Image (cartoon, helix red, strand yellow):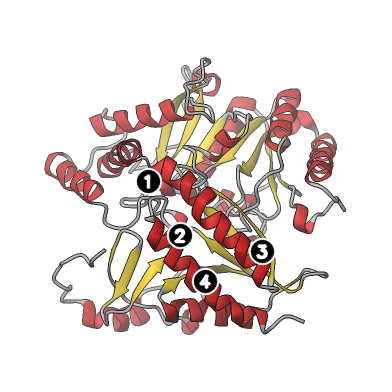
Amino acid sequence: MTKLETDPSPLMESAYTNDRARVFHSWSAQGALDPVVMAGALGSKMWDADGNTWIDFTSQLVNMNLGHQHPKMIQAIKDQAEVLCMVSPGFANDQRSEAARLIVERANRDRSGAARPDGHFEKVFFTNAGAEAVENAVRLAKGYTGRLKVLSMYRSYHGGTAMAIGLTGEPRRLENEPAMPGLVKFWGPYPYRSQFYSDSDEQECERALQHLRDTIVFEGGNKIAAIVLESVVGTNGVLIPPDGYLEGVRALCDEFGIVMIADEVMAGFGRTGQWFAWHNWDAQPDLISFAKGVNSGYVPLGGVVISSAIAASYDDRVFPGGLTYSGHPLACATAVASINIFEEEGVLEQARHLGSDIIGPALSRMEQSHPSIGLVRGIGVFWVIELVKNRATREPMDAATMGRVAAECKARGMWPMVVANRITVVPPCNTPDDVATEGLAILDEALTIADSAIS
C-alpha cells in the first residue's frame, strides 16, 4: 500500500499552532493536549507530515469500517456534489430514499443474511450522528408508549447530548448531572467482573436477567417506555452478551409492553461481522439507533430504524422532532455507496474472517504468552484485551503502564485504542490480512512492557 499522492495543504505548517490556539477538543483538559497533525491516510494506514506512518487499529473512533479514502466513497461524494449538495428534510431525495430502503432491507435480515418474513422494520429517521440517533429513538418510544421512564446499563456509552449522556452509564456522565428525569440504570452481564457473583456465562445470564426483572418491577413496569442497550457494549469493554441474554431482554420487553432499543452506533454495519450486532442472536429490537459504520464517517450521518408498529403510530399525529440536516444528500449518498461496497467487496465476510482466522487466534496466543493479559474477548473486528497487574485478583493495570504500552505501539508503527486498562483492537473491517497481522505483531511486542509491571 502506498500513500495517497496529494499536494500538502498550504495550511499544514500552521495546523498545530492554530489547533492549540483556537480548537477546543472534546473530553479533554485543553492544556494537556499534544495532538499529532495528520497529513493523510489510505486504507488501514495513516501518516503525518514528517512521514511517520501508523497502522490504524482504532478506525479513528471505531467508525471507519471501510477504512480511509476508499475511492468509491470519494467518488460518491463528488458525484452527489455535482447534482445536489443540500435539500431540507421536507423534500424527497433519491439518495435519502435509497439509503433508507437499503438500511431497512438489511435490518430485516437474520444472522444467515436471509430476509425475515415479518418485515418488522419499515422506516428510517435520519440524524447527524449517534447521540442524536439515541435521543430520537427514546423520543419515538416515549411517544409510542405514553410513558416517561427509560432504563439503560451501567458500563455503557450512548452519546454526549443531554438525553444520551444521561442514559450513559460510565463516569463521563457524572459531570453532566443532574440528568433528565426518568432515567434508571441497571447492571448488565459481565462475567469477568460480575456484579452477580456468577461462576459461568449461563449463571451470569440468568442472574442479570433476574436483576433486570426486579428493576422493572420496582420502577413500575407500566411506567417504563424503553430499555436502551448496546447490543455489544463498545467503549466500556466490548462486552459480548452471554447467549440468551438479549432474548431474555426481548421477552421482558414483551411482557411489560416496553420498547427495546438496540444502540448499534458502534457495533453496527460490519463491526461484528453482521449488518447489525443483534443479528448474531435472535432478539429483534423495536428501534435501532445507528451511525459510524453506516458510511464510515465520510460525511456525518446517523439514524433510527423504526418498526412498522411504531412508525404507524405517527401516521395521524406529529412526531415532535426534527433536524435541519436530517437525511443530508451528501451523507446519504455515502451510505448508499457504503452498503453497495459491503456487498460488492465481501466486507462482512472479511470481517468474520479477520475475527475467526487472524485477530482471534493471535490474541489467544498473546493471552497464553503474556501474564499481564487477564482476558481476551471479541467478535468480528471488535476485540479487547484486559490488562491486569495480577491475574488472580484481576486488579486492573495502572494508567502509567497503559500509557507506556500505547507509546511503544505508536513508536513501532501501530496506533492503538486504549481505554482504562483495556486495549481495544478495532481496525477497519476490510483490513488486509497482512496489515492486520503486522499490527498484531507490534501489539505482541509492546505487551512485554505490561508484563514487567505485573505483581
Amino acid at dot 3: Pro
- CA distance for labels 4 and 1: 32 Å
- CA distance for labels 4 and 2: 19 Å
For residue 61, the mark is 2
Amino acid at dot 4: Leu
The crowd level at tag 4 (other Cα within 10 Å; few <14, some 14-19, many 20+) is many
For residue 301, the mark is 1
Q: SS class of the residue under badge 2?
A: helix
Q: In terms of sequence position, does the residue under pointer 4 or pointer 2 come before the other?
A: 2
Q: SS class of the residue under badge 4?
A: helix
For residue 171, the mark is 3
Amino acid at dot 1: Leu
For residue 443, the mark is 4
Residue visible at 37% across and 46% down in the picture: 301
Amino acid at dot 2: Leu
Q: In terms of sequence position, does the residue under pointer 2 or pointer 3 come before the other?
A: 2
